[in-house]
Amino acid sequence: LEISKTARMLAVAGDETRFKILNFMFQKKKACVSDIASAVGMTIGCISHHLQIMRDNGFFETKREGNNICYTLVESSFNKKLKKIITN
């Protein structure tokens, strides 16, 4: 990754709420917004906002399943390194 992209991704991941989301998602790999909101203890609207930012920065991919939008972690070297930091 180029330095500016790495710095931006670290800034995105460094937010406390997004850190909690990543911690949850590293365990689950795939989850719908309502499940993430419940696990993190925040509203769906708030979590959706954070997930959108994270998706836009390459952390997640989305897929609609009925009325739900589900998020899946992108398999990237950045996410793998971040997982080691967060889950230790």
Image (tube, grey):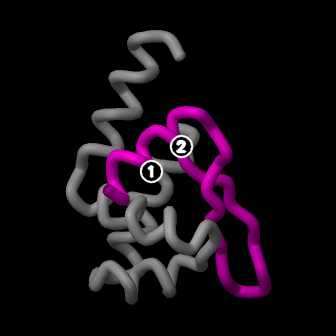
Q: Is 82 rendered above or below residue 31?
A: above
Q: Give the range drawn in magenta.
A: 59-88
The local secondary structure at tag 1 comes to helix
Residue located 34% across and 46% down the image: 85
Name the residue nearer the viewer: 80 or 6: 80
Q: Mark 1 points at which residue?
A: 83
Q: Is 44 rendered above or below residue 83?
A: below
Image coords of residue 35 (percent x, y) = 50, 85
Quarter of the image with the C terminus is: bottom left
Image coords of residue 79 (percent x, y) = 52, 43
Residue 68 relative to residue 88: left or right? right
Image coords of residue 8 (percent x, y) = 36, 27
Name the residue nearer the viewer: 76 or 71: 76
Q: Do the residues labelled 1 and 2 touch (CB within 8 Å)?
A: yes
Residue 19 relative to residue 73: left or right? left
Image quadrant of residue 77?
A: top right
Give yes or no for residue 75 being in the magenta stretch. yes
Q: Which amino acid does label 1 sit on?
A: Lys
Q: Mark 2 points at which residue?
A: 80
The local secondary structure at tag 2 comes to helix
